[in-house]
Image (spheres, rainbow, N blue to C red):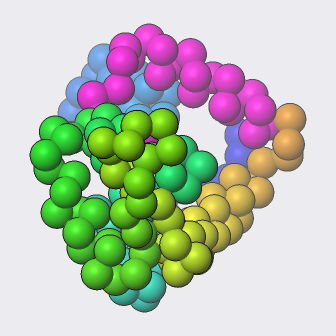
Amino acid sequence: MTDRDPVDQHVERWLPVVPDLDPDVEGAVVRMSLLTRHLREVKDRALAELDLQEKEYGTLHALAGRGGRAAPSEIAGDLRMAPASITARVDALVRRGFVRRIPSEVDRRRIDVELTDAGRGAWQRAMRVVGDEEHRVLGALAPDERRVLSDLLRRVTLAAGPPPGRI
């Protein structure tokens, strides 16, 4: 057995209360929840330090994922939002100098949104903080163990069905 953590104590406390509790299922679910919460807190702190709201970061992230330029409807689709809802987000990012509106290269009736250097920089700084913490935490595992963990979580994710929200 490896080192014990607070989840082991949690499972031990609940086993007498819920005799049919599967300690492996409970341990895995609680640990995934704690890890998710930890990474969310790191991300929230990073965004606060960078004076970036979650919705701003999400919009910059979606835009960066499309090569830094996209139609508002494409960004809205990536964020699973109504296309009309993206306008206020883009307006706020334009005011901050993080994006600009430019004529589409494929349809002269359309306006695209493009990341500015400032927007790409803000997005990259936030990504770096979060990515560094993800690597630090998962650095507890050897590369082959990380691959096994990823494969096991893929199977569990597929069993859960389609995700309710965005990735």
Residue 131 place in picture, x, y as percent: 63, 62
Tell me: residue 104, above or below residue 115: above
Residue 68 place in picture, x, y as percent: 55, 55
Tell whether 8 sits left or right of 11: right
Please report the residue visible at 32 percent of the width from the left and 44 percent of the height from the top.
Answer: 110
Quadrant in which the N terminus is drawn: top right
- In this view, the residue in front, 138 or 114, is 114
- In this view, the residue in front, 129 or 83, is 83
Q: Give the magenta range.
A: 145-167
Q: Quadrant of residue 41?
A: bottom left
Tell whether 147 sits left or right of 105: right
- In this view, the residue in front, 21 or 19, is 21
Q: Is residue 150 magenta?
A: yes
Is residue 69 visible from the viewing direction of this image?
A: yes
Residue 10 place in picture, x, y as percent: 37, 48
Quadrant in which the C terminus is drawn: top left
Q: Main secondary structure of the magenta part?
A: helix
